[in-house]
Amino acid sequence: MENINIFSDLKNKVALITGGYGHLGTAMVEVLSSLGAKVHVLARSEEKFNKKFKESSDTIFFQKTDISNFDSISKSIGVIGRKEKKIDIFINNANFGVTNHPEKMTSQEWRLGINGNLNQFFDFIQIVTPFLKKSENGKYWIIYNKSTGKILKNINYIPANFNNILK
């Protein structure tokens, strides 16, 4: 894979990010916004969004989304797609689940982790990819912090190895 500097020419680009409240997510939101992108943070709590980004520019927006719910993801992507007419960047930085050794987990906890780390990722890819393909330059990026790269053989994606991104 060639090295791509995603931080060049972000003026008027539309970016979506899940997991925008954590340290990495917040930094990505702020950098993308400072470089001219319109950034939509997909999350459940508008109160947390307002606390985190209360001093933000007018280029950071909240979109209520429950990443564990396919219909909520679909509705959110549709709202943003209709409003912006395109999506240039999708950053899947969120996950949820129980972290424990499998011997100490219940079956329900295991399934919650699979849903939070794989199923929601798949749901987003299914829903957001048609919008990403409409990006004005015909290229699109999916950045993620999961270990599911093998799933995406036919999609242009950048794994969250920032050594590749920042070169």
Image (spheres, rainbow, N blue to C red):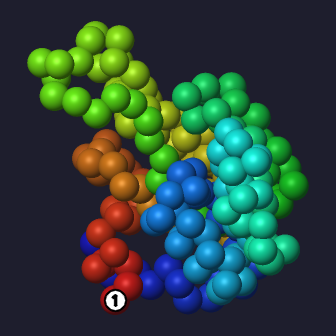
Vertical order, 65 against 143 (above or below) = above
Dividing the picture into quadrants, the one containing residue 138 is bottom right
Residue 17 percent coordinates (x, y): 59, 57
Dividing the picture into quadrants, the one containing residue 83 is bottom right
Q: In which quadrant of the rendered image does the N terminus lie?
A: bottom left
Q: Is residue 71 visible?
A: yes
Residue nearer the viewer, 2 or 116: 116
Residue nearer the viewer, 75 or 23: 23
Which residue bears the numbered disc 1?
A: 167
Q: In which quadrant of the rendered image does the C terminus lie?
A: bottom left
Residue under the point 76% across and 74% down: 56
Q: Is residue 25 left or right of residue 4?
A: right
- What is the crowding at mark 1: few (fewer than 14 residues within 10 Å), some, or many (at least 20)? few
Q: Could you say whether the residue bearing mark 1 is in a helix, strand or loop?
A: loop
Residue nearer the viewer, 137 or 164: 164
Q: Is residue 91 visible?
A: no
Residue nearer the viewer, 52 or 80: 52
Type of residue at label 1?
Lys
Residue under the point 47% across and 64% down: 23
Residue under the point 68% across and 25% down: 71
Residue 129 percent coordinates (x, y): 58, 49
Vertical order, 86 against 3 (above or below) = above
